[in-house]
Image (cartoon, helix red, strand yellow):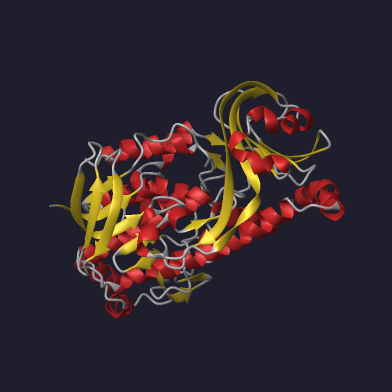
Amino acid sequence: MRRSDVLIIGAGPTGLVLALWLAKQSVKVRVIDKTDGPGTTSRALAVQARTLELYRQLDLTEEILTKGHKVPGINLWVEGEKKARVPFGTIAADLTPYGPFIYPQDQHERLLIEHLEAFGVSVERNTELLGFSDAGDHIVATLRRADGQEEPCEANYLAGCDGARSIVRQTAGIGFPGGTYQQVFYVADVDASGPALDGELHVDLDEADFLAVFPLKGEGRARLIGTVRDERAAQADSLKFEDVSDRAIQHMKVQIRTVNWFSTYRVHHRVTEHFRKGRIFLLGDAAHIHSPAGGQGMNTGIGDAINLAWKLKAVLADQASDALLDTYESERRAFALKLVATTDRGFTLATAEGWAADFIRTRIVPVLVPTLFKFEAVRDYLFSAVSQIVINYRDSAISEGKAGDVNGGDRLPWAPTPSDDNFETLGTIGWQVHVYGTSSADLGDWCTRRGLALHAFAWQEAYAKKGLAQNAMYLLRPDTYVALAAEQQDPELLSRYFKDHGLSLI
């Protein structure tokens, strides 16, 4: 009977990223998907800054930056006129190397598949999960292969990356509480012209029906995303682009040449009751779904995959106890709950009906938003939230200490200087220690004996401005979040950390 370390169900971005991270760590993975090929159309567009930061570990970042489209700004429309513009040019300059970026999901998937195949792993297409059971020390699953034959197989762990209608979640009997928005969403990839086809993001604020024009790479290419709430919503399956396009044409002066793809769908806001059940894990849309506001969905699933991958590797390699896997649920579910609540509030506000809501959208927002973005603190706060660089695991069982303004569980602050970029060391998957200042001989000896990478950066005031403490010690997890922050370079603190959490480096 064929056996793998991790059996991954679903070859969307979440499943592919999980497979990539595991394969790079020499974990034996198997990826199945019931479709006959990667997607040729795409709903998800945004690749957030935090995803691009983490993608450095797989040498994906530069390729995506070359193939995708950087968004220069957002424009707000009212009554057929562009009323305000918020530039994105320097919005992330002091926070992260990466700004708002678009790289469509279908292209994204093909790139991930190409890199996965370089590790000798291919997606098994037209292959469906029929059922599984948790045998205690492994999973037994039954698959239906492309030839129609049923195949029993085994795995140490099962990862459900199989979307909102997850068979893994349903079979495991895990609840998926939440609700459904009344609006029907439509998406259309078009070739078009007009003032809203200038490579920037455009949003119409006129009515309670949401409408946005997202730029795609290439002249005149764009994605339209809108909602329908009137009687047309009851006939979503039969809607055509002509049924929903009047507003884009009239309000935003979009002149359509070709509709390359059009689809409608309903959106839910749900978070599963558990992200882990024994040897079963849920990731991406199988674990959480929400409004597309803010371009968070695909990136959150990718974050799930990266969070889980290093923990699975550690447990499989006997470098961690099973308790480490519990932190996947505690860390990622807490974020998912917060994200769903936030996007729900934002979407509800953006689509609220009535004269008061219309007045706020059309009269106040076009004035208020550009004004607020003139303040650095506001720009940083809003960008940090949307880009996901604000995500932290401070409440995690494996987060400890504080040094300067940096807590255990925080994302390591990006602190480039004329001579160094502290993110240059984050291109590998593994534990490492950072010292901003001078590292002690004792710390160096301790790290050398255990094969733990130690990076010391000559002290500069730029580090203090980012909240880093001089000569402090920062232990980074394999996913580059701070595990332990300590004001003193005490190797005993490191020894105690690994011992207390059942972790080892060998």
Q: Position of residue 30 (x, y in %)?
A: 25, 48
The answer to whether 219 appears left or right of 320 in the picture is: right
Q: Position of residue 329 (x, y in %)?
A: 41, 67
Q: Position of residue 31 (x, y in %)?
A: 28, 46
The answer to whether 74 appears left or right of 221 in the picture is: right
Q: Closer to the camera, 74 or 425?
A: 74
Q: Residue at x 84, y 36 (%)?
A: 79
Residue 21 visible at all = no
Q: Position of residue 424 (x, y in %)?
A: 39, 50
The answer to whether 362 appears left or right of 217 in the picture is: right
Residue 149 visible at all = yes
Q: In the rendered image of this protein, does residue 60 appear above or below residue 351?
A: above
Q: Quadrant of residue 255?
A: top right
The answer to whether 394 appears left or right of 305 in the picture is: right
Q: Closer to the camera, 197 or 136?
A: 136
Q: Quadrant of residue 390?
A: bottom right
Q: In the rendered image of this protein, does residue 115 appear above or below residue 133?
A: above
Q: In the rendered image of this protein, does residue 234 appear above or below residue 277?
A: above
Q: Quadrant of residue 474?
A: bottom left
